[in-house]
Amino acid sequence: MELSRLRERLRSMPSPSQKPVQKAAAGLIRREGDAPADERLDSLGEVALRRIGCRDAAFDIESALFLDTETTGLSGGVGTVAFLVGMGWVERGRMRTLQLLMRDYASEQLLLEEVARVAARFDSVVTFNGNGFDLPLLATRCTMNRMENPLEEMLSLDLLPPARKVWRRRLKSVRLANLEEKILGAGREGDLPGSEAPERYFTYLKTGDEGLLEEVIEHNRQDIVSMGALLAELCAVWEDPRSARAAADLYSLGRALAQQGEKDEARELYRLAGRPRPKTDLGALIEEQYRTEANMELSRLLRREGRRAEQEELLLRMRAAGEGGLFPYIELGKLYEHARRDYPRARETVRQALALAPEEEKEALRARLERIERKIRKQNEQEDA
């Protein structure tokens, strides 16, 4: 009897050539919504788009897909999966959103296929740190699922780099939530930190409690909506950088535009950043720091452009105000020695710097002073001859 039962069980087992029957994918949780879109998105300037990194002058907001992911890990890598992909687009003054969350890992291909279907309608993809995280992650997941990457040929506009360039010095943190509060004036209440999203998803997989995902979905939706407002604000700032109020922002914009070759605009931004401001609180002291940085950078720019008279005027003003420590003395010494060949005046300026310099900087200044003394002696000898 036992032997017959064993034969029955053996017959019921699949043969090695048979493929085991796979459990059907649980599918996706879909959320659709809309919110008011920033009105400025309808008139983004070409100059601003170029300055923030948009390579295509024909960028069209209605052909742009805003995209954000929530993942099973924050460090990327082959084992990290995007369990939620949020997408948004501007349509008739509204930000339409579609969020796709996979109910289990077996639904990943279904999610990626749906992302591909939506992405096919758009020419560009707008992200926040997408070039560094979201887009490479989705590319890897497509490869793992033997699919073509639907985002590969789309123009990518990552909002993190231009936001970092203009606001990092003042705000320190340029996380999207911090930019919402400090720049967009729309802080979140009761928002789930993105770092907690993976644990919520893992707990959902164990318990099946979809309620655990509600805050994750809302966090992702808000990220998409905020990216639209952030794009509008970035374009406004980069279109008219002189409208920035904080010295730190003006200085940052000046540096960024100088690196992009826009020297005339950079020069004016340094001038604006370098204006005196009332010292009323800690924030004003930080502003003073970047005011000095701006004047130092302006001096370097004027020197490179050969605008020596303007550079001298600036440095004399800095020296009179006690601004920049030894910087104006050293730069004036270089100007008088090399550009003007006014060695007596160069000597006097370096002597003034020596009187103020800390011990560790005096050796270099003494060497400079000795060189200038030699030039003076040589000049005197030539005049006597």
Image (cartoon, rainbow, N blue to C red):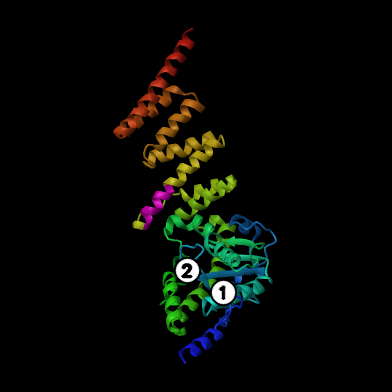
Magenta: predominant secondary structure element? helix
- Which residue is rendered at x = 55% and y = 77% of the image? 106
Task: Mark 1 and mark 2 in contact? Answer it, CB < 8 Å.
Answer: no
Relative horizontal placement of residue 223, taking residue 126 as reference (left or right): left
Magenta stretch encompasses residue 22: no
- Which residue is rendered at x = 48% and y = 55% of the image? 249
Residue 245 visible, this orientation:
no
Answer few, some or many: residues within 10 Å of disc 2's Cα (few below 14, many 20 plus, some between 14 and 19): some
Say if 8 sits above or below 154 in the image.
Answer: below
Helix or strand or loop: what does disc 1 sit on?
helix
Helix or strand or loop: what does disc 2 sit on?
helix
Relative horizontal placement of residue 345, taking residue 159 as reference (left or right): left
Q: Position of residue 53 (x, y in %)?
A: 60, 56
Magenta stretch encompasses residue 289: yes
The boundaries of the magenta stretch are 283-291
Q: Position of residue 34 (x, y in %)?
A: 58, 80
Answer few, some or many: residues within 10 Å of disc 1's Cα (few below 14, many 20 plus, some between 14 and 19): many
Q: Position of residue 5 (x, y in %)?
A: 49, 90
Residue 83 visible, this orientation:
yes
Quadrant of residue 371 in the image?
top left
Q: Which mark is residue 15?
A: none
Relative horizontal placement of residue 65, taking residue 272 as reference (left or right): right
Q: Earlier in the sequence, mark 1 or mark 2?
A: 1
Q: Which mark is residue 180?
A: 2
Which amino acid, by three-letter code, is at mark 2? Glu
Q: Which mark is residue 108?
A: 1
Which amino acid, by three-letter code, is at mark 1? Glu
